[in-house]
Image: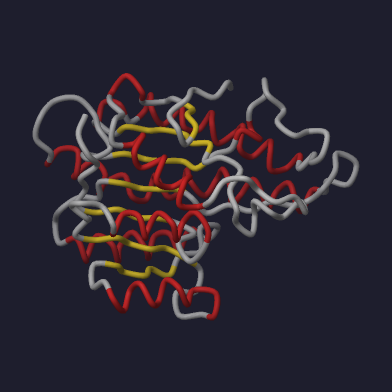
Amino acid sequence: MGKLSVCSALVTGANRGIGLGFVQHLLALPNPPEWVFAGCRDPKGQRAQELQKLASKHPNVVPVPLEVTDPASIKAAAASVGERLKGSGLNLLINNAGIVRLNTLDSETLKDMAEVYTTNTTAPLLLSQAFLPLLKKAAQGSTGSGMSCSKAAIVNISSIGGSIKEMYLWDIAHFVSYRCSKAALNMLTRCQSMGYREHGILCIAFHPGWVQTDMGNAGGQMAPLTVDASVGGMLKVLSKLSEKDSGSFLDWEGNVVAW
């Protein structure tokens, strides 16, 4: 496979961390997308200043108001993106928005379990449903056979924290709601890969690494991986994926992560 070459991409949680990193790296591609839709709760707010700067310099960056836990907001975002695309499809949907609650097994609550699951698992499902017509249109409009991320793909940002086999860093962080939500997201990715195969849409779950973001450092430990290294690695992996990889759980270097 060649370099990643997409006409359009949507990134959720794009105002900071890995999401903002995706926007920056997509812009830096040799053949950057015609449109980079940057979804976040409040594109004009204080927490989106870096995104605002990018958008002011790059007319192909379109900040999109998007609260991923609100079906009405998702529907409005899909309509807005569809209008901007003017009949062409969406090549890449990157479900990056996520939250974590620093609870132990004993202190987890119904409220936190529900909130984390809604953001980390249900939201990627609803977003994929809402943008499916645009993804299908991109797949149908692409030349050549087989699947690739340059044609149409759903990328779910998961975590090795959701690996039932690994139970990564259990000794220092239980984060039960987060782990459960990401394990469920991995199953969603498998379901999407089966259900959307006939439409030519590639679906992948990524462990981005333990990254130096607000979330990555939330447990009081310094994460070892920079956003640039993580996102650069994931985009490199995305450029090489094909039909046989759909439904996989990979890390930012392309290694298979155990379920």
Query: In the shown orientation, is residue 84 left or right of residue 233?
Result: left
Query: In the shown orientation, is residue 103 left or right of residue 56?
Result: right
The residue furthest right is: 106
The residue furthest left is: 143
Query: In the shown orientation, is residue 233 left or right of residue 187?
Result: left
> Is 245 above or below relative to 57?
above
Q: Could you tell me which quadrant the C terminus lies in? A: top right
75 or 154, which lies in front? 154
Q: Residue at x 42, y 50 (%)?
A: 127
Q: Residue at x 72, y 27 (%)?
A: 167
Q: Residue at x 26, y 71 (%)?
A: 58
Coordinates of residue 118 in the picture (x, y in percent): 61, 49
172 or 223, which lies in front? 223
Q: Tell me how the rendering is colored.
A: secondary structure
Coordinates of residue 235 in the picture (x, y in percent): 35, 42
Q: Quadrant of residue 26?
A: bottom left
Query: In the shown orientation, is residue 140 left or right of residue 153?
Result: left
Looking at the rendered structure, the number of numbered marks drawn on it comes to 0
> Is 103 above or below relative to 2?
below
Q: Could you tell me which quadrant the N terminus lies in? A: top left
Coordinates of residue 80 in the picture (x, y in percent): 30, 66
> Is 205 above or below relative to 33?
above
Coordinates of residue 189 in the picture (x, y in percent): 46, 32
177 or 70, which lies in front? 177
